[in-house]
Image: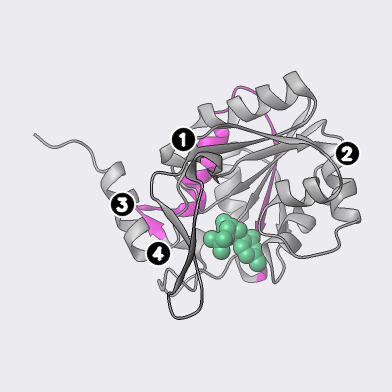
Amino acid sequence: PRVACIVVAAGSGTRLGAGAPKAFVALAGRTILEHALHSVAGMSAEPHVVVVVPADRVDEARTVLDRVLSGGDIAVGGATRQASVAAGLALIGDADIVLVHDAARALTPSALFDRVVDAVAATGTGAIPGLPVSDTIKRTAAGGAIIDTVDRSQLAAVQTPQGFPAAELVAAYGSAARDVTDDAQLMADAGHPVAVVEGDPLAFKVTTAWDLRRAEELLRPASA
Ligand code: C5P
């Protein structure tokens, strides 16, 4: 199948507080975006890559994209992740399968991209990586009062890359009626089944300064 991969990197990174858009923050000597693109470059399928960035980062993104993947497209992102994905979808061309990936998941192994592509190719439906939730989860009210405990066995913490039949995702975006935080929810709203495949702890999202520190530690060469 022809595979396209949209890498969304247009977030502001307010929670990281590093003074730059998150995907352009340095992590072990490279930007978070560059790490993410190296993972994409390691995929078995050679995807058509679309990187979505803030308007003032287009030139920088072009340089990184040419260096790591020798080609691909750049789109300018929007105010929400959903708007940024929509901007990327406009440039995927005639792909059969589209992956949407958060640049902020900088350490995602290439094998996870392959697993998602394989699942979509095998089933013809959407596939997203997820991991069991290890903490006990409480539903709480304002002020911290506990309402109840959520049945953990029914929960999955989902990650990216999320993969879908391209035509279905494009149509789901065309008919999107609300703001959502992931593409699988839009697909569900449009009536398309999406399955969870095994995720990877390394696909964690760099959101806070703590996450950035954890990523730095994981990239540090083992010392004697
Ligand atoms: O903010 P959050 O960490 O959930 O963002 C997930 C991903 O979506 C990040 O890679 C971020 O750059 C991207 N994003 C985007 N455009 C936005 C908001 C987030 O491309 N307006």
Image quadrant in which you'd find residue 167: top right
The verdict on residue 52 being magenta is yes
Question: Looking at the rendering, in which quadrant would you find the C terminus?
Answer: top left
The residue that label 3 is drawn on is 214
For label 2, count other residues whose C-alpha is less than 10 Å away and answer few (under 14), some (14-19) or many (20+). few
Q: Nearer the viewer, residue 43 or 194?
A: 194
The residue that label 1 is drawn on is 200
Image quadrant in which you'd find residue 40: top right
User: How far is the residue under mark 4 from the one under mark 1?
Assistant: 19 Å
Query: Could you tell me which residue is drawn at 67 percent across and 24 percent down?
Result: 119
* 34 to 198, vertically: above or below: below
For label 3, count other residues whose C-alpha is less than 10 Å away and answer few (under 14), some (14-19) or many (20+). few
Query: Could you tell me which residue is drawn at 51 percent across and 59 percent down?
Result: 23
Question: Looking at the rendering, in which quadrant would you find the N terminus?
Answer: top right
Residue 93 visible? The answer is no
* 210 to 20, vertically: above or below: above
The residue that label 4 is drawn on is 208
Q: Nearer the viewer, residue 184 or 13?
A: 184
Task: Please provide percent x and percent y for residue 202.
Answer: 42, 40
Residue type (three-letter) at the residue carrying disc 1: Asp
For label 1, count other residues whose C-alpha is less than 10 Å away and answer few (under 14), some (14-19) or many (20+). some
Query: Could you tell me which residue is drawn at 60 percent across and 26 percent down?
Result: 114
**Residue extent of the magenta highlight:** 26-55
Residue type (three-letter) at the residue carrying disc 4: Thr
Residue 57 visible? The answer is yes
